[in-house]
Image (tube, rainbow, N blue to C red):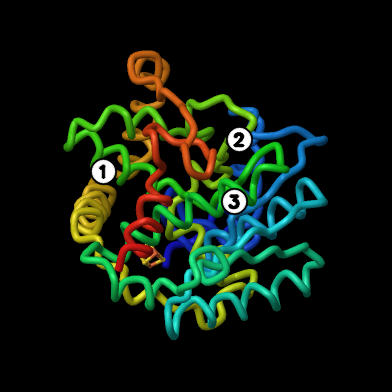
Amino acid sequence: MALCECKKKAVIDVRTPMCKEHFIEFFEDKVEQTIHEFDLFSNNSKIAVAASGGKDSTTLLYLIKKLHGNITAIAIDEGIHDYRDKNLDNLKKFCSKENIELKIYSFKDYTGLTLDEALKHFKLSPCHVCGIWRRYLINKAAREYDVLATGHNLDDEAQSVVMNMMKSNLKILARLGPVSGNIKDPKFTSRVKPLYFIHEKEVAVYALLKGFLTDFTECPNAKDSFRSTVRDELNDLEKVRRGSKERIVRGFLNNLDSIISNNKDELSFCSQCQEPTKESICNSCKLLNKLAAV
Ligand code: SF4
């Protein structure tokens, strides 16, 4: 590994070689700059953090607690055997050590079934069902907060931009950005992404240096092949053209206002549960109706 500008041994070389002390200082400054540049929240904001026990959200919890003080972690227990229970145990320990309030909502309490049990009744991909119910529960849980901070990093965002451009999916592109979602409604809490300009590798190294990485487990259902392909391509591009991921995201942000103004989400409310949706019945209720019919 190369040397940092201070001549100490570098621990990372994603942008420029940096020693442990300079990297931690850079990382925390970059997150703080993003919060200010995009006005993600103020000193008085009531903040919830979507937490999973993984490196991104644990880093986010730590930093927002450090920068802002009082926060609440919101976690969803999907009921995925040998995965979520382990990560939730890590999260509970972390929140207890850092004195962070933790609220956990489960698929089992909401639907009567864990995700593993529900999937036996659907011919749908696990991530499709999981995504619908996760968004539903998180949105309801976050309602009493001013913002919901999520652990999306630069790699996640660059991948989402490229994937949705390749699919010409402008409606979804319009929901990306450091403050995601273009819906203004009391039943919808804004999502904010303080790690927006931080590379995934930087989060991993920061979490390692801070001792957050314990025995984090990958979800057994994580087989998103299109995202994996785009991720590998962008990683290769970044190796030969350093800064490519940030240029993709900055270029996207330069055009985000016009994408949003041409692709505004029309919000209505589900006739069954009265939660926000774009259709007469929300996707979550549609899944519950399918379950009730089996
Ligand atoms: Fe849910 Fe799929 Fe993520 Fe697993 S990989 S937690 S099933 S969305």
Q: CA distance from mark 1 to mark 2?
A: 42 Å
Q: What is the secondary structure assignment of the residue under circle 3?
A: helix
Q: Which residue is mark 3?
A: 27
Horizontal side, residue 153 vs residue 19: left or right:
left
Q: Percent from the top left, x then y, of residue 77?
A: 54, 70
Horizontal side, residue 130 vs residue 112: left or right:
left
Q: Report the mark closest to the observer, 1 or 2.
A: 2
Q: Is residue 180 above or below residue 240?
A: above
- Judge: label 2 CB < 8 Å from ligand 1: no
Mark 1 or 2, nearer chain start: 2
Figure quadrant of the C terminus: bottom left
For the residue pair 283 and 260, the one nearer the viewer reads as: 283
Mark 3 or 2, nearer chain start: 3
**Mark 2, other Cα within 10 Å: few <14 / some 14–19 / many ≥20:** some
Q: Residue at x 76, y 47 (%)?
A: 67
For the residue pair 122 and 134, the one nearer the viewer reads as: 122
Q: Residue at x 54, y 63 (%)?
A: 110
Q: Amino acid at mark 3?
A: Phe
Q: What is the secondary structure assignment of the residue under circle 1?
A: loop
Q: CA distance from mark 3 to mark 2?
A: 33 Å
Q: What is the secondary structure assignment of the residue under circle 2?
A: loop
Instruction: Report if the CB atoms under discs 1 and 3 are less than 8 Å apart.
Output: no
Q: Which residue is mark 1?
A: 241
Q: Which residue is mark 2?
A: 187
Q: CA distance from mark 1 to mark 3?
A: 21 Å
Q: Is residue 20 above or below residue 84?
A: above
The quarter holding residue 186 reads top right
The quarter holding residue 148 reads top right
Q: Amino acid at mark 1?
A: Arg
Q: Residue at x 60, y 70 (%)?
A: 209
